[in-house]
Structures are given as structure tokens and as C-alpha cells.
């Protein structure tokens, strides 16, 4: 690199020296001509000049000098053009800078912070979840491996590192039972001390896919990918999502968050609008398995229209997912010859549809999403509900619906690092503590720079009986939440 | 419905004007948007350039694969170009690409360090598109748009 720089500098110096050699004698000649032909007349005009210089001997006639000067000028222009070409040729001879995509990029995001979730000590939720005390949190530590070894082919693997399932409640005890948590602590057999501690965690494959993307209207992706459904599942990560808390249809997985299978997608442009689609065929609900262990397929898709002019960015979308899901059980019933019996303890069909709208106007961001889900069980194959809370209870067929609205406003300068937002969410789904929930929330995002963001949110979730009567007192299960995360994209 | 939309827009647009990011053309230089000579396009407008430089559009109308080339983020030329074609200031451009990475979207355009490298790449790659100062243009490439005073126009 220094030698390349030195060569470039040397060429520049040579270029300047050459210019000097060419222009200097001619410049002197021109000055002489001007002095002989033009200055006298100017001096003549200055009648106040005390002592006009005498005319030079053999002063040439200005008119006769004109053709010679024109010829000089043309010669100069010709030489300058030659020099320019030589300079461009020298520049083009410099070592090539790579203009290809890097074969592998590694990037990601992380968030850590604090949270406090509070509810009535007598509430059902207070005994099911670890709440009513402050928690410092290590949230996401996600690393992306983005490979593009050749043009038109790409692979993306996103891994999340977590200490889970360390600390997860595995048994609530119940009558005569014992409350237990998962402990992954063990001894490090390769440690420098005999009893050096080790706490294995988990590596979660968030997604892992390969795609061929040569054709704009038809790109093919195979592997494990996020379900193309609505806004939340597309935005996915804490640096990109406005809110910290997730909408309930996401946490309750009304559709599979990710699927393993085939996706075709593409887009086209009509003026300033982009029109796009995605169509999927997958293992359906078996999102965490490498195999289609229940033998059923899921199918879905999304269409959207987007117009992005920088200051105004509009996206309208519609998403769908459908499929059958069951618990596939195989029992060996004989050994000579070997026989077996297949059955399903539960089986249901589901259809989920969502509509979404995003509008960014200047520093204002609006998001809205509505989702409807229909779930019907095969007769005799319903899932059971908590036998402690509802002995003999079975899950009903159900309609579920939800709608949320989110509005965020980045403040004007010099407070433009602040983005307060407001969020309202209503959803209806039959649960033991009521079938209606309303969530009101306020948040404040503080953007320190393009990579670091501090996200804060308070929320109140209120349970109530919307369409059905719950056997439990809804009000005891209302939840107050405070979340705070420092987020970094890298 | 139309009335509601009108009311909503009348509420939002003044707000957007109040809070609009104050990016302005910084370098004040005339920028030439250039393509390979084999590219049949004679003129490119903002609606064609924006998705190519956002890498949401992958091919030219001719079917040739588009290959956008950017200058570094701290280049005044790049900032002017982004401001006019993407409608974004440097901070929002940076956030745009962070969001795209997190979503798993297509990669940003290839970045080179100098205008000379842009000229050379555009001259050698049939689908390439880039931008340089108008005074740096040579006869190895084709100019399809100009940017001056914060406006995109035909060459």
C-alpha cells in the first residue's frame, strides 16, 4: 500500500513538472507579447502617469500576433488533452479496488437491561411466572452469519446464545408436589480446579436458510425462515422494533414464528410503488423440529404494497397461514412380527389472517396490525387444559382476534435522540382468566447513535370477560410491567 | 373514507414538516449518475434509482442484473446522492441499513473508496451504476442523470 501511494504521488509530481515545463516558457512568451502589444495602449490611457515608458524597439503589430497566439492556444489545448488522457490512463493503471460483495459477513445485535413485572400476589399469573421482583436481564445475543460466496446465491444463519433453560420452572409443586427449577450447573471436567463450575446454555437457531435470488419476481429460499407475516415478524430484532414488548398474538404464537420448508418470493415495481409477495410451504407448526414429525404441512403467504420516498414511507400488507397440527404418537403393539399403532392425542386445523399498515411521515412512525385466527379440533382429539385449574377441561374450538395501534414520534432537534411512543392493544382469546385483554403502554426510546439504543416501556394489561364468563376474578390478574433494555447493533 | 384520510393527512403532514430531518445538499457540487455504456437506459429518475440503491430492485428493465456502487458514508458526494435519491440524511441512511441487516434483508451496495474506482467499476461491469462529480466524467461511461442544487434531472 505505501508503495502504491508513493507511485501515485510520484505520478502526480511528474504530471505537475510536465505541466510546468510546457506552460512556463509559453507563459513568459505570452507575457512578453502582452507587454509589447497590450500594455502600451493601457499605459497610454493613463494620462496621469508621470513617466510613460518608451515603446519597446520593434514592437510587433497586435493584429499580426493574433494568428500566432491562436496557434499557440490550440497547441496548448492539444497538449492539455494529451496530459488529461495520460493522467486518466495512469489512474486506471492503479491497483484495482475490489468491487464484489464480501463472501462472508458477521454482524448481530445484543440487548441487556432490567425489568419489573408486578401483579397481585394472589393472582394465578404470580404463581406461574417469575414476577413481582426486579430482574436484571441478559436478553438477546444474536449473531448473523451472512454468506454470499458467489453471485445470486446467499445463505443466512442467525444464532441466539442464551443461558436458558437455566432457572426455568419445571414443576409448580401442586398438592404434595415439590417446586423445582432447571439447573444446568455442573463441574467443568476440563477446568483448572477439580470442582470448577460450568453452566451449559443453549444455541438457538433463529433462522438458517439458503436462497437463489437471481430472478427479481421469483426468488427461492429453502431452510428455516421467519414466517412472512405482518410487521412484527419481519422487523424481528430489538434494534428495529419500536416497542420492547411483543404483541400477544406473537407471544401466544397464533401463527408459527418460523417455519422449515420452501419459500418463493419476489417483487415488482410500478412507478414509485413496490409490489411484493411471498408464498410458503412448510412443516407447519413443527417449527422447532428438523423433521415434519406430525406428517402435516403448513402453507401461507403475504402480499404487500410499499411506497418509500424517504420522508413518507407507506406499507400495506396482508398475510395468511393455514395448516393442520397434531401430536403424532406411534406405539409398538407386537414384536413377532413387529406391529405398531399410530394415533394422535390432539389434532386441529387452523387458519390465521392478518392485515397490517405502516406509515412513516418524517419523524412520525405509525404501525397497525389486525389478526384473526380460527382453530377447530378434530372430534375426540382436543388438547387438555391445566388439570389443576380446570379438572377435566379440554380446549375449545375458538375464534381469536386482535388489533394493536402504535404511534411513535421522534422529537425535533436538539431532542431528536428521544422517540416517545404510545401503544394500545386489544385481543380476544378464551383463557382461564378471561377472554379479553387490553394493553395500554407508553415507551421512550433514546438513540445515542446509529448503533446504540436505550429502550424503555411501561405497560398495563387488563383482563376482562369479553364473550365468555371466566371462573376466576379477572382483576387479580391485571399486570403492570416495566421493561428497560440497552440495545446494540454491531 | 376520503374525508378521514384527508383529516389524517392534514394532521400528519404539518407535524412532519415541523420535525423533518434537516438534511441539505452538503457538497454543492454537480453529481453525475453514471452507468455502463452497454446499459440501454438513457435517463434514470428517482423511482428507478432509489430501489436499486436500496437493493430492493435487483435487475434493470433489460433483465441485466443491477450492480449499484456506493462511496463511503462520510463522502459529501454520497450524502448528497442519498439525500436526493433516497430522501434520507446520513443518520437515517445508517439506521436504514441496520434495520435491513436485522431483518435479514439483501445486502447494501458494494462500497468503493474513490470516484476513480467508481468510474472503473461502472466502465467494466455491464449492470453497474454509480455516481461521480460531473467534472470527473470520462468517455468510458454514460451519464443518465445529474444532481445539482439538491435536485435530480436528466443529463
Image: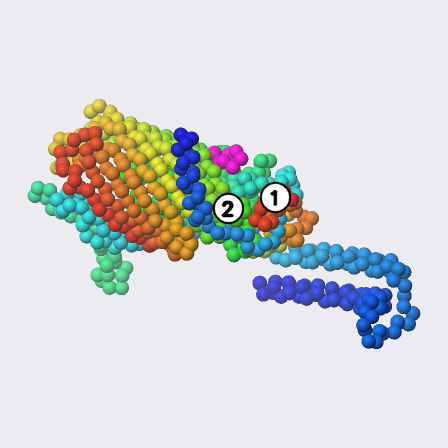
Q: Numbered disc 2: what chain?
A: B
Residue at 24% over, 64% down: A193
Q: Quadrant of residue B115?
A: bottom right
Evaluate if marks 2 and 1 touch, with contact meaning CB atoms under 8 Å apart. Answer: no
Q: Residue furthest front?
A: A48
Going from N to C along the chain, the mark reached first, 2 or 1, is 2
In the rendered image, the vertical position of residue A26 relative to residue A50, given as above or below: above
Q: Bounds of the magenta span?
A: A267-275
Q: Please identify the quarter of the rendering in which residue A392 is found.
A: top left
Q: Secondary structure at mark 1?
A: strand
Same chain check for tags 2 and 1: yes
Name the residue that disc number 1 marks: B153
- Which one is nearer the viewer's eye here, A158 or A57? A57
Q: Was residue B51 drawn as part of the magenta stretch in this picture? A: no
Image point 64% across, 65% down: which residue?
A: A9
Q: How is the image coloured?
A: rainbow
The residue at the point 44 percent across, 44 percent down is: B14
Residue A168, numbered circle: none
Q: Chain of mark 1?
A: B
Q: Quadrant of residue A358?
A: top left
Residue A186 vs A336, above or below: the answer is below
Q: Is residue A122 above or below residue A4?
A: above
Residue B114: x %, y % from top left? 59, 56
SS assignment for the magenta stretch, majority: strand
Kind of element beneath mark 2: loop
Circle 2 residue: B87
Q: Quadrant of the C terminus of chain A?
A: bottom left
Residue A151 in sight here: no
Amino acid at each position: 500500500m505505501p508503495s502504491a501511494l508513493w507511485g501515485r504521488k510520484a505520478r502526480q509530481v511528474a504530471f505537475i513538472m510536465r505541466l510546468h515545463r510546457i506552460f512556463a516558457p509559453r507563459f513568459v512568451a505570452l507575457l512578453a507579447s502582452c507587454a509589447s502589444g497590450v500594455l502600451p495602449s493601457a499605459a497610454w490611457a493613463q494620462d496621469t502617469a508621470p513617466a510613460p515608458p518608451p515603446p519597446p524597439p520593434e514592437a510587433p503589430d497586435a493584429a499580426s500576433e493574433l494568428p500566432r497566439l491562436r496557434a499557440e492556444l490550440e497547441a496548448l489545448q492539444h497538449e492539455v488533452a494529451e496530459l488529461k488522457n495520460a493522467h486518466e490512463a495512469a489512474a486506471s493503471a492503479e491497483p484495482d479496488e475490489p468491487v464484489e460483495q464480501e463472501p462472508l459477513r458477521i454482524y448481530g445485535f445484543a440487548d441487556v437491561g432490567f425489568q419489573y413485572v408486578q401483579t397481585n400476589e394472589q393472582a394465578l399469573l404470580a404463581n406461574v411466572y417469575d414476577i413481582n421482583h426486579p430482574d436484571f436481564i441478559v436478553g438477546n445475543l444474536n449473531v448473523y452469519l451472512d454468506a454470499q460466496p458467489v453471485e445470486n446465491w446467499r445463505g443466512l444463519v442467525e444464532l441466539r446464545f442464551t443461558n436458558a433453560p437455566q432457572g426455568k420452572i419445571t414443576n409448580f409443586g401442586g398438592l404434595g408436589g415439590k417446586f423445582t427449577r432447571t439447573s444446568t450447573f455442573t463441574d467443568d471436567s476440563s477446568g483448572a480446579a477439580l470442582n470448577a463450575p460450568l453452566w451449559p446454555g443453549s444455541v438457538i437457531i433463529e433462522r438458517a436458510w439458503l436462497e437463489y435470488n437471481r430472478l427479481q419476481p421469483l426468488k427461492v429460499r429453502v431452510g428455516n425462515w421467519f414466517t412472512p407475516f405482518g410487521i412484527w415478524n419481519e422487523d424481528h430484532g430489538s434494534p428495529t422494533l419500536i416497542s420492547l414488548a411483543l404483541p400477544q398474538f406473537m407471544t401466544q404464537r397464533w401463527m408459527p414464528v418460523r417455519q422449515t420448508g420452501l419459500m418463493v418470493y419476489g417483487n415488482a415495481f410500478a412507478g414509485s410503488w413496490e409490489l411484493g409477495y411471498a408464498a410458503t410451504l412448510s412443516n407447519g407448526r413443527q417449527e422447532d423440529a428438523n423433521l415434519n414429525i406430525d406428517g402435516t404441512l403448513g402453507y401461507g403467504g403475504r402480499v404487500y404494497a410499499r411506497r418509500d420516498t424517504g420522508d413518507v414511507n407507506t406499507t400495506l400488507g396482508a398475510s395468511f397461514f393455514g395448516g393442520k397440527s397434531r401430536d403424532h404418537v406411534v406405539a409398538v403393539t407386537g414384536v413377532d412380527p413387529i406391529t405398531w399403532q399410530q394415533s394422535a392425542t390432539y389434532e386441529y386445523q387452523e387458519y390465521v389472517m392478518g392485515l397490517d399498515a405502516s406509515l412513516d411521515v418524517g419523524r412520525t412512525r405509525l404501525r397497525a396490525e389486525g389478526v384473526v385466527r380460527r382453530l377447530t379440533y378434530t372430534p375426540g382429539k382436543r388438547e387438555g387444559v391445566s388439570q389443576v385449574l380446570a379438572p377435566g377441561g379440554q380446549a375449545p374450538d375458538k375464534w381469536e382476534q386482535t388489533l394493536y395501534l402504535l404511534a411513535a414520534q421522534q422529537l425535533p432537534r436538539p431532542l431528536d435522540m428521544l422517540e416517545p411512543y404510545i401503544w394500545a392493544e386489544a385481543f380476544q382469546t378464551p383463557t382461564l382468566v378471561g377472554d379479553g385483554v387490553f394493553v395500554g403502554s407508553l415507551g421512550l426510546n433514546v438513540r445515542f447513535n446509529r448503533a446504540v439504543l436505550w429502550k424503555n416501556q411501561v405497560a398495563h394489561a387488563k383482563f376482562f370477560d369479553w364473550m365468555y364468563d371466566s371462573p376466576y376474578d379477572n382483576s387479580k390478574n391485571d399486570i403492570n410491567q416495566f421493561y428497560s433494555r440497552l440495545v446494540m447493533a454491531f | 373514507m376520503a374525508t378521514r384520510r384527508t383529516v389524517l393527512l392534514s394532521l400528519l403532514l404539518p407535524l412532519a414538516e415541523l420535525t423533518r430531518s434537516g438534511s441539505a445538499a452538503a457538497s454543492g457540487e454537480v453529481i453525475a449518475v453514471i452507468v455502463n455504456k452497454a446499459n440501454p437506459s438513457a435517463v434514470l429518475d428517482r423511482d428507478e434509482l432509489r430501489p436499486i440503491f436500496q437493493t430492493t430492485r435487483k435487475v434493470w428493465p433489460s433483465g441485466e442484473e443491477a450492480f449499484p456502487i456506493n462511496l463511503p458514508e462520510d463522502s459529501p458526494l454520497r450524502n448528497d446522492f442519498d439525500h436526493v435519491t433516497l430522501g434520507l440524511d446520513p443518520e437515517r441512511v445508517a439506521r436504514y441499513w441496520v434495520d435491513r441487516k436485522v431483518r435479514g434483508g439483501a445486502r447494501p451496495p458494494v462500497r468503493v473508496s474513490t470516484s476513480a474506482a467508481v468510474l472503473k467499476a461502472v466502465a467494466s461491469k455491464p449492470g453497474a451504476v454509480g455516481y461521480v462529480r460531473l467534472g470527473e466524467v470520462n468517455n468510458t461511461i454514460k451519464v443518465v442523470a445529474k444532481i445539482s442544487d439538491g435536485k435530480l434531472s436528466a443529463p
